[in-house]
Image (cartoon, helix red, strand yellow):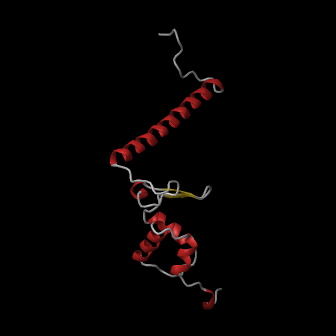
Amino acid sequence: MYNSNEFVRRTFYSIELKHQICKDHIENGLSLRECVDKYNLSCHSLVHDWLRKLGYVAGMNRRTRSAYIGIENFQTLPDKSQKKSTPLTPEQQQIELLKKELEDAKLLAEGYRRMIEIAESELKIPIRKKPNTR
């Protein structure tokens, strides 16, 4: 049985405040620790959850601690790899998007090729058409 003194009081945050914290983290470059200190949050995982739930980040991979950013929010994030780069024109953005899609298609084709090789060699399943057959 719990005493009334043992209950942890939950704090509820408004949706406006959640958006402000997420924007401070993304646009102003505040670290999670700085967000926790500035807004008196209980832990930094709140910010992770809000980023994902409010659409700033598409999803989090806990194993690698990397974030997958949605296309709609990509332009709002600071680019850490390039110093002071010029903004891309819509045509250049389209080219970059097509390059990424081509790379994904190549990886998918390679995966299918390997899967067929394994099926033919280990499982003895003939999949490819042999030469000189009709």
Viewer-side residue, 100 vs 16: 100
Viewer-side residue, 112 vs 85: 85
Could you tell me which quadrant the N terminus lies in? bottom right
Viewer-side residue, 2 vs 40: 40
In the image, 55: left or right of 40? left
At 51% across and 17% down in the image, what residue appears? 129
In the image, 126: left or right of 17? right
Is the residue 15 above or below the residue 98 in the image?
A: below
Residue 95 falls in image quadrant: top left
In the image, 45: left or right of 84? right
In the image, 89: left or right of 118? left
Is the residue 127 above or below the residue 84 in the image?
A: above
At 41% across and 75% down in the image, what residue appears? 15
Viewer-side residue, 25 vs 132: 25
User: x, y percentage for residue 124?
Assistant: 63, 23
Count of marks placed on residues: 0
Residue 99 falls in image quadrant: top left
Is the residue 90 above or below the residue 62 in the image?
A: above
At 46% across and 79% down in the image, what residue appears? 13
User: x, y percentage for residue 6?
Assistant: 63, 87
Is the residue 1 above or below the residue 130 in the image?
A: below
At 62% across and 91% down in the image, what residue appears? 5
User: x, y percentage for residue 11?
Assistant: 51, 82
User: x, y percentage for residue 122?
Assistant: 66, 27
